[in-house]
Image: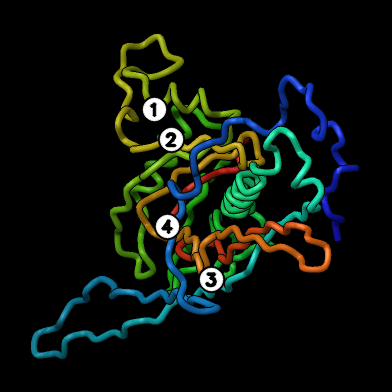
Amino acid sequence: MATAFGTGNAPELLWPGIAAMWGTDYSDYPTLYTKIFSVEKASKRFEKVQQMTGLGLASVKNEGGSIPMTNLLQGFQKEYVMVTYGLGTSITHEMMQDEQYGYIKKVPKFLARSMRQTEETHAFNVLNRHVNTAFLGPDGVALVSTAHVMAGGGANGSNRLATDADLTQTSLETLLQQLMDEVDDRQLKTRRMPKCLVVPTASNFRARKLLESAYVTGSADNDVNPLLGLLADLVGSPWITDSDAWGVVTDAEGLRFWRREATEIFRDNEFSTRNLNIATTGRWDVSFDDWRCIYGTIGA
């Protein structure tokens, strides 16, 4: 356990003469995970999300015969379990009295920043593990796969490029075409719509050229860019760890951030030491259930 932050830890803060301090007043990214994950309020320790299927194609009814009958199906289930996260620090009574520059007053801001980036890290780790078989979805495979199991049987579903590729005009158009050909768990066509392109910062400028150019990028032809206006948003995230992975988030709500307890900052003074303890906690779980929420690739 860390000891209390006292006058011996930062003696320069006790004396006049410091012209400025650096290292804490950096600008932050706006909240990014809320553009990708649906944030939902949890009311208990765990929340379950249940898949239910529709029906398949109709069959021929022979003259005088009975109408073909089939059953509705209960599909896969995902359970989200709430976990508490926290961080705190302790400051001696003497440091509180003697510090000259208002640094201690910024501790709540530091805690809030740490907790917000913890949320971003955990949320984007869901995407970072998109092909990691140690983190499986309700159907028993990773988030992005060519072998998603259909609850109603039949051919497997795929939300991964058949041949992984870096982000280009061609690869993005191929992935979007794959999204347009999607079927549900009863092999019926669905109309999933692309919502945003999510990329690491290494691909951010390339992505902007693809989405915002009036004409096809990297081409001497005068072809119009069919991607212009097709996706409503671009998320370039510094929390994505694979420099050439990318994906398209759809309007299927399968990426979920369940919040059981909002992040809160609280403080208390120890009676015996008069040390000031400042801490923050939050409680949530973040994961995925419906794989149709994103189509992606690990890059070339």
Position of the N terminus by quadrant: bottom right
Residue 234 is labelled as 2
Comparing labels 3 and 4, the label whose residue is closer to the camera: 4
Separation of residues labelled 4 and 1 (CA atoms): 24 Å
Comparing labels 1 and 2, the label whose residue is closer to the camera: 2
Separation of residues labelled 2 and 3 (CA atoms): 28 Å
Relative height, residue 278 to residue 97 (above, below):
below
The x and y percentages for residue 19 are 73, 19
Task: Give the amino acid at mark 4.
Answer: Ser
Task: Determine which residue is flagged by label 1.
Answer: 211
Task: Determine which residue is flagged by label 4.
Answer: 38
Task: Give the amino acid at mark 2.
Answer: Leu
Residue 213, quarter of picture: top left
Residue at image x 82%, y 30%?
15
Separation of residues labelled 1 and 3 (CA atoms): 33 Å
Task: Give the amino acid at mark 3.
Answer: Pro
Task: Determine which residue is flagged by label 3.
Answer: 138
Separation of residues labelled 1 and 2 (CA atoms): 8 Å
Dot 3, how many residues are within 10 Å of its Cα: few (below 14), some (14-19), or many (20+)? Answer: many
* Residue 165 visible (yes or no): no
Q: Earlier in the sequence, mark 4 or mark 2?
A: 4
